[in-house]
Image (cartoon, rainbow, N blue to C red):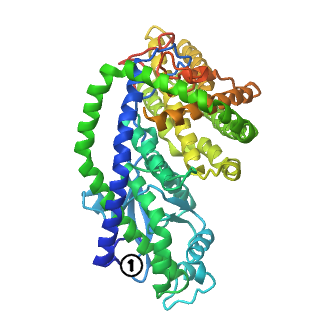
Amino acid sequence: MGGRPSSPLDKRQQQHLRGQVDTLLSNFLPCYRGQLAASVLWQISQELGPQEPAGCQLLHSKKLPRVREHRGPLALLRGHPPQWQPIFCVLRGDGRLEWFSHREEYENGDPPLGSAALTGYTVLTSQREYLRLLDALCLDSAGDHTQEEPDPLLETPVRFPLFLQHPFRGHLCLSGATGEMQRAWRLALQGGIRLRGTVLRRSQAPAARAFLEAIRLYRQQRGHFGDDDATLGSDAEVLTAVLMRQLLPELRAQTLPGLREAGRARAWAWTKLLDAVHAAVLAGASAGLRAFQPEKDELLAALERTIRPDVDQMLRLRARVAGRIQAEVQGPLESCLRGKVDVQLPLVMQTLLSTVEAELSVLQTLLTQGMDHLSCDLRRSPSGTRLRKEVYSFGEMPWDPELMQTCYRKAEQSRGRLGQLTAPFGFFGTQSLVFGAQDLAQQLMADAVATFLQLADQCLTTALDCDQAAQQLEKVGGRVLKELPEFEGDVLALGSPALTIEGIYEDIVRGVLLQRINQEWKKALSASDVSCTLDDCSEAPWDQAGADVVTEAQRGTCSKQPGPGAKVQPARLLPPPGTFQS
């Protein structure tokens, strides 16, 4: 636990896993290639489509999502037999955890003792809960804790533990010296887990969109039609998780009976084996995707050259085919929606809306407090040095884990409500929804902060005294707060598949379903305390002229950058040299 000694896999097992990865890639890459074409077509159609004035006026912050680097001393359970040993831990800005024997090794730039990308991990701070998890890993020996060596987790209770658990990797057992240290590390680690988990979903690149759609189709071809958290992580990590899910039943059947350990030692041995399998699969998937990269780059460039000149003709063709297909499926589709979808939509809308509303309310409070603090500080102390420090702190609000935790907690508290979607819809992607809501909150905070700083710098001049400047800041703050509710509809962002018969068919079904969703969404919003213009906040999957299947709601767009009708159209994110340059 902690380090990675020699692999428990022999050469035959490693060769078998390489064959499994090769089979996965040979089946997946053709699907990926096809979705690259669809993604490029979608992107070009969005670029060339009519740009309606955006109702949302917040600037779109271009600061890349990140976590604050966090570092400090911890204890790590490692060695054979495992013992608690002091280490110096560092959480990097990209969500990678590293640990060193001493702080000096980190400061000298020495390589770490070990490291782990936090994708897919869960943080537990209860020793009892973690022990129950270990017991559940090997159900056939859940009641047998007889071991040849003492169990450190049983012999030595841990007051401030940080257990990092992963379904396919070895666990990391850490411990802080104080409750305050435990809380700070928990928030930092959770931020790193979310950052790494949503990397593909945040990306606007055609390749990322194509990859996610290809994963969905690949799994559907193998009988998986539900939704879960399989797409959390990078492309290689997602492929690894997909294959690990396929391999897990066989691994359990063939390996667990042969483990010599008993009780929780048996569970640790099982996680060590899983970690070795995961590492081998991840290495193979990464190598395969790297080998595919030059072909992918050439394919994307060729698609851009061939699709862009003929995009209008392709979209007209798509519209004609879609019209014929829709005429055939409209009746059965409407019947299906009335019988199986309409009755469930109110639950879905209320569940999603309550989550977003709760987060948005806390977000407004945090932002108001931050802006009020700046105004009050300006009145109390007109010092330029102090003001620049306060402005910098204000600009860092979206990346402050302690501050944003009050907002993120609202999404975490919605797990129970989101879990209600499992039974009627077979939906198991609760973690993805929670991460998505938290990402949305962070992005909204970043956008609001960027807008406030930009407007403040435009209105403040050296001719204003402190009271006048504070009054201007209050006016700017009120203007920014009015824009936040306009983003509530961002929780619905639906995409579109390829220019193929299968893709067009799916898009028709999605289009009709989206129309139903938007109708119910407007009903829920009309009864909500928070207003939103849905037509300004829904992403348009396809926006080509003459396509009968495109609903009015699908034509609406919500660019997070000000459109032609917006009042705020600054050219850059950071304020120009002036009073509010942070």
- The image shows residue 467, relative to residue 195, as above or below, that is above
Q: Residues within 10 Å of mark 1 (few under 14, many from 20)?
A: some
Q: Quadrant of residue 312?
A: top left
Residue at the bottom extreme? 148
| Figure check: 505 above or below 462 | below
Q: Residue at x 72, y 37 (%)?
A: 350
Q: Is residue 473 visible?
A: yes
Q: How many marks?
A: 1
Badge 1 marks a residue whose secondary structure is: loop
Quadrant location of the N terminus in the rendered image:
bottom left
Q: Residue at x 52, y 65 (%)?
A: 163
Q: Is residue 469 above or below residue 496?
A: above
Front one among 347 and 16: 16
Q: Is residue 111 left or right of residue 84?
A: left
Residue drawn where x is 24% and y is 51% of the image: 291
Q: Residue tagged by mark 1?
A: 79
Look at the image and tell me in which quarter the C terminus lies.
top left
Q: Position of residue 31 (x, y in %)?
A: 38, 46
Q: Position of residue 436 (x, y in %)?
A: 54, 42
Q: Amino acid at mark 1?
A: Gly
Residue 193 makes an appearance in the image: no
Q: Nearer the viewer, residue 146 or 93?
A: 146
The one of 380 and 506 positioned closer to us in this rendering = 506
Q: Position of residue 313 (x, y in %)?
A: 38, 19
Q: Nearer the viewer, residue 78 or 53?
A: 53
Q: Residue at x 42, y 29 (%)?
A: 42
What percent of the width, then of the height, locates residue 113?
31, 67
